[in-house]
Image: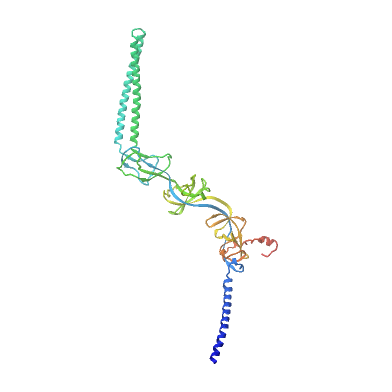
Amino acid sequence: MKTKLKNLIIKKKTPIIITIAIIFIGLFGWILYKSFFVANKGPGMGQRGISVAVEIAPIEKGSIKDLGQFSGTLIPKSQFVVAPKISGKLNKLLVDIGDVLRNGQLVAVLEDEEYQQQVIQAEADLRVARANLEEAKSSLELAKKDLERARTLHEKGIQSDSQLDAAVAQYNAQESKYKVTIAQLANKEAALEAAKVRLSYTRIKASWERENDIRYVGERFVNEGTLLSPNTPIFSIINLQPITAIVYVTERDYFRLKIGQKTTIASSAFLDKTFSGQVVRIAPLLKETSRQARVEIEIQNPEGLLKPGMFINTQIEFTRREKTTIVPYSALVDRSGQRGVFLADIENKKAYFRPVTVGIVEEKRAEILEPSQISGHVVTLGHHLLEDGVNIILPQNIPSSSKVNAQAPGEPSTSEKNSSGGKR
């Protein structure tokens, strides 16, 4: 009987104990929640009493550039192929790949025996033509004397009209023959000059318009002993100073480009060296397949370090602004659809959100167009935990020159506070 009573009492007390345990567990959980979650609640939830550790940087005045980044390939400023104008066996190559060339330099020699014989034959034909001319000239002078004698005798009535006509016809024939021999002599002289020109073609030279340029042998296409036909390529000749970079731009940057814009070129082959250049040509169209336009950049290459075919990266300076307001790009944040920065009030250790209008962005720096008069310091790290007016914990190594307050929106400046006798 006692055992049943005891069991009954235990059954009645169990729900009460469980209820009390649940209450204690809930109270303990609430204390933990208040201690850890609410105490660390984000600034967007209105907990302005929490101090947030931040990094800051000064707002600067300086110059900033709007740069376009492009990649491309180098090609020679000019390139042409040396080829023979006549056929023949290639006897000798006088230069090879990489050799420096001067304007008019001899680079190859063809077999020339046949063309030397043509010159000898043309000289012999010219001598015959000159002899024929002398003979025709003598015959013409003799015919002229016969004609004068016939006219004199005809006037005296000694010779008949038919005899005078025969003398005139003879003179005209000799005069025509003389003119023909003159033409033949000119023809033989031209043939000799042509034979000499063909002979000169056996000595192949590299020549171009600008006299002072230095060129280089880029490629060699044939070997000595090769039987060449006219216009068979022997060498390619290239110009490396200046050298040209080809880049392709989309329509977003196309209309920002202008002839003469300065560029800076870098190559992975020269990590510690850059080259200067400028835009010299802009294609008047964008390709339908790629929606890109070709742009040529002339690069100064006095040492010949840059070579055709190399891959390069180039920066094109679109615009530059001087004495403008600049902040670190990391200071920019978005709050409620607004772009802005957090100004650091160093004296009061608070951060105030200020909407801004951003201009040029150059690598890790950004231009502030509006408001243009902001000064002081901006938060660059930790601003994702901030809201307007939140307390901040500043770094310990702030220089003395940075003890400038960031003016909170709607508050008087420090000078105004001092003039009015306010607490500093």
Residue for point 54% across, 52% down: 65
Check the image and tell me how it is coloured.
Answer: rainbow
209 to the left or right of 352: left
| Coordinates of residue 15 in the picture (x, y in percent) | 56, 82
Task: Determine the image quadrant of residue 172.
Answer: top left
- Relative to the observer, which residue lies in front, 71 or 375? 71
Figure check: 59 above or below 257: below
| Coordinates of residue 322 in the picture (x, y in percent) | 57, 52
3 to the left or right of 138: right
- Relative to the observer, which residue lies in front, 253 or 349? 253
- Relative to the observer, which residue lies in front, 207 or 332? 332
- Relative to the observer, which residue lies in front, 136 or 5? 5
Figure check: 359 above or below 123: below
| Location of the N terminus (image quadrant) | bottom right
| Coordinates of residue 290 in the picture (x, y in percent) | 46, 49
| Coordinates of residue 220 in the picture (x, y in percent) | 35, 45
185 to the left or right of 65: left
Of all residues, the one furthest to the top in this rendering is 157
Task: Determine the image quadrant of residue 216.
Answer: top left
Whether residue 63 is visible, yes or no, is yes
| Location of the C terminus (image quadrant) | bottom right
Task: Determine the image quadrant of residue 370.
Answer: bottom right
Whether residue 339 is visible, yes or no, is no
Residue for point 57% across, 71% down: 37
